């Protein structure tokens, strides 16, 4: 009977040490896991802030492109009108020369 009692005591002693060891290992792992989650939260917050800034910059860029695009279209129309005026004068002078040769 004493032999079985000693074996039971040894079993419970080893089990208690194992439970304490596993608990300490789990606590250490939990601490590292919490630190990782904090870092992930920090990174996602930074990504969110930077993406908001990028979207703001893109909106400003779109406004600038629209504004400058209108200026470019105005210049294009102006140049098209000037070039068109020169081309129509050339055509009319050619038409005069051709009419003069035909007479």
Image (tube, helix red, strand yellow):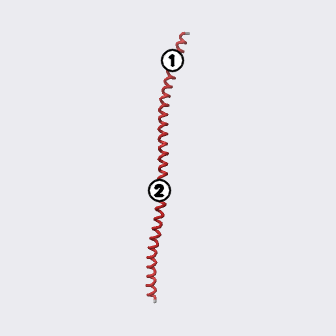
Residue at (48%, 37%) from the top-left corner? 38
In the image, farthest residue toward the bottom: 103
The crowding category of the residue bearing disc 1, from other C-alpha atoms within 10 Å (few below 14, some 14 to 19, many at least 20), is few
> Looking at the image, which is closer to me, 42 or 15?
42
Q: Which residue is mark 1?
A: 13
Disc 1 versus disc 2: nearer the observer: 2
Q: Measured along the vertical axis of the image, is residue 42 above or below residue 2? A: below
> Looking at the image, which is closer to me, 80 or 7?
80
In the image, farthest residue toward the right: 1
Element type at marker 2?
helix
Gap between marks 1 and 2 measured at Cα: 71 Å
Element type at marker 1?
helix
Residue 79 image point, x, y percent = 44, 70
Q: Quarter holding the N terminus?
A: top right
The crowding category of the residue bearing disc 2, from other C-alpha atoms within 10 Å (few below 14, some 14 to 19, many at least 20), is few
Q: Which residue is mark 2?
A: 61
Residue at (46%, 62%) from the top-left corner? 68
Q: Measured along the vertical axis of the image, is residue 31 above or below residue 40? A: above
Name the disc covering residue 62, or none.
none
Residue 6 image point, x, y percent = 52, 12
Residue 63 image point, x, y percent = 49, 58
Residue 78 image point, x, y percent = 46, 70
> Looking at the image, which is closer to me, 39 or 17?
39
Residue at (47%, 69%) from the top-left corner? 77
Residue at (47%, 43%) from the top-left corner? 46
């Amino acid at each position: 009977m004493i032999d079985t009692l000693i074996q039971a005591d040894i079993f419970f002693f080893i089990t208690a040490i194992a439970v304490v060891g596993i608990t300490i290992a789990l606590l250490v792992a939990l601490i590292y896991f919490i630190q990782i989650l904090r870092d992930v939260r920090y990174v996602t917050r930074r990504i969110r802030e930077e993406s908001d800034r990028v979207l703001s910059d893109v909106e400003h860029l779109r406004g600038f492109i629209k504004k400058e695009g209108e200026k470019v279209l105005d210049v294009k129309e102006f140049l098209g009108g000037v070039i068109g005026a020169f081309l129509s004068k050339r055509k009319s002078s050619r038409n005069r020369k051709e009419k003069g040769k035909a007479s």
